[in-house]
Image (spheres, helix red, strand yellow):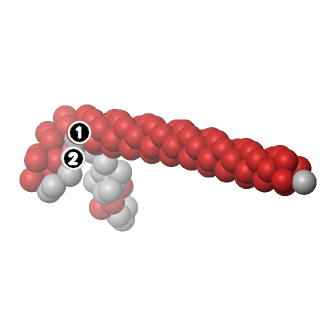
Amino acid sequence: DTGSSSEEEPERGRGDTFPGQRSEWEEKEAEQGGFELVEARASKRLAKRDLQRNKESKRLEQEIRAKKEEEQDRLRQHREWAAATQARRDEEARKAAAATQAR
């Protein structure tokens, strides 16, 4: 018999040589090696997504609030400008009326 011993032994590194012990090994490694189970990773991912969604909604609310304030400021400035213009016209009209009466 000149065959190599590798023909008689299962291949190494295939991962399915001991399928019954594989799940035990994975659980043990997950607990000891610092690995997270899929459920834990999924819940962290969902929590991160919710946090990002909350941040985005707060940012949008703040942006909407800023736009409203800007619009109100523009409206206030326009009213002040219109009032100042009207006051100037009234003053000019009063001066013109006084000048015609003085003649």
What amino acid is found at the position of numbered circle 1 in the picture? Ala
Q: Is residue 10 above or below residue 47?
A: below
- Image quadrant occupied by the N terminus: bottom left
Taking depth in this image into account, of 98 and 58 the one nearest to the observer is: 98
Residue 12 visible to the viewer: yes
Write the residue at 73% across / 51% down.
Answer: 91
Q: From the viewer's perspective, tell me whether residue 13 is left or right of residue 99.
A: left
- Image quadrant occupied by the C terminus: bottom right
Residue 45: x percent and y percent? 34, 41
Quickly name the residue at label 1.
40
What amino acid is found at the position of numbered circle 2 in the picture? Glu
Write the residue at 69% across / 47% down.
Answer: 87
Q: From the viewer's perspective, tell me whether residue 6 is left or right of residue 59.
A: left
**Residue 94, which numbered label?**
none
Q: From the viewer's perspective, tell me whether residue 36 is left or right of residue 12.
A: left
Q: Tell me if label 2 and label 1 are in contact, CB under 8 Å.
A: yes
Residue 35: x percent and y percent? 20, 51
Identify the image quadrant of residue 44.
Answer: top left
Q: From the viewer's perspective, tell me whether residue 67 is left or right of residue 53.
A: right
Quickly name the residue at label 2.
36
Residue 16: x percent and y percent? 31, 43
Taking depth in this image into account, of 90 and 42 the one nearest to the observer is: 90
Identify the image quadrant of residue 11.
Answer: bottom left
Q: Is residue 33 above or below residue 36?
A: below
Identify the image quadrant of residue 43.
Answer: top left
